[in-house]
Amino acid sequence: MSITGINGILEKAFAGRWIAGERIEDALEISEKMNLRKTGSIINYLGEGITDKKRIGEASEKYTELISAINKKKLKASIAVKPTQIGLSKDWKTAYANYSKIVSYARKKNVFVWMDMEESIYTERSIALYLSMVRNGNTGICIQSYLRRSMRDVKSLLEEGSTIRLVKGAYKENSTSAFPTRAEATTNFVSIMGLLFKHSERFMAATHDKTIIEKAIKMSKKSEAEISFGMLNGIMNGYAYELARTQDVYLYLPFGEEWVAYGYRRLKELRNSLLIARSLFSKQ
Ligand SMILES: Cc1cc2nc3c(=O)[nH]c(=O)nc-3n(C[C@H](O)[C@H](O)[C@H](O)COP(=O)(O)OP(=O)(O)OC[C@H]3O[C@@H](n4cnc5c(N)ncnc54)[C@H](O)[C@@H]3O)c2cc1C
């Protein structure tokens, strides 16, 4: 389903607000505008759970095109790749071939590659895929604080010189693998962040939780670790631009036609959020 192809409130009020558009050019144009406001972008080509060989190949090619354009336009932008978009839900060999191709090409073009984290059934293999290229130096991995395993994962990832982007987590998980409440995910976020301040060279705190952001800024004054902040496009851009005056800030900017899964995760969060009115009507 395309953004322009559906009618109604959902299209106008939600998807269009969070997603750059369908084309690479749409993402590049918005990224340029963000850069003018001292804010970097993390550009993601929408798509996940792909098992069709041709579509996996196309997604991988799209990233090559994106890396090349970011380099040419000298944007302050990195890319974010979902493991199941480049083959992890098909087979390891395909995922490895695509991930190593993307990361190697990005290194040549001086572009940073984030690996997004999806449902916990993929966590183990995503980490293994990430570690297969960690020595390349230009790649980082997302870790979700709602997972019970994450503190352990972060400790072992740091031993391998990994760069972490810490989030709370966006997928439906059972209480065996994840903390059942947002409050517990928040507490674990802060604990993991403490570890990152102590033992990492740099990391990203990716959250809209202002209490955490303020805490992180305070903690950063006593730490050597370089911190950057990440937020999703269309949630609190005004606040992100303000924060970017004093901090290193990136907005996660998806583009493409496969917006449904992404849109519904954001919708679920919007429903849970007390800031519905602010998200919809605040100045971007
Ligand atoms: C840069 C970046 C990359 C991410 N990558 C991943 C990933 O790879 N894997 C993954 O599982 N998750 C990812 N996420 C999503 C993340 O896990 C959370 O689901 C999302 O950020 C909301 O959690 P929060 O930390 O903002 O805290 P919450 O406690 O959920 O929200 C804090 C406050 O933010 C505001 N808010 C949050 N969401 C919305 C919304 N949709 N609309 C309006 N207001 C809102 C509300 O004011 C809310 O009270 C990413 C998030 C960011 C910012």
Image (cartoon, grey):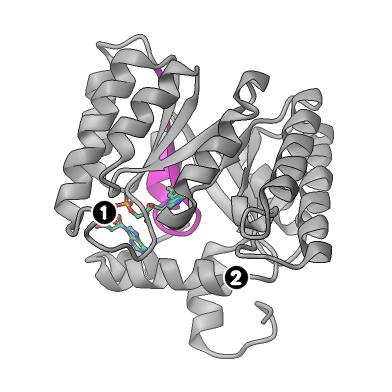
What kind of residue is marked 1? Ala
Secondary structure of residue under mark 2: loop
Q: Write the residue at 69% across / 47% down.
A: 95
The percent position of residue 32, horizontal first and vertical second, equals: 68, 43
121 is higher (above) or lower (below) than 49:
above
Residue for badge 2: 259
Q: Is residue 36 above or below residue 236?
A: above
Q: Nearer the viewer, mark 1 or mark 2?
A: 1
Quarter of the image holding residue 134? top right
Q: Nearer the viewer, residue 177 or 142?
A: 177
- Residue 274 location (% of width, % of height): 22, 66
Residue 227 in view of the camera:
no
Ligand 1 quadrant? bottom left
| Residue corresponding to mark 1 | 178
Q: Residue at x 25, y 69 (%)?
A: 272
Q: Is residue 39 left or right of residue 211?
A: right
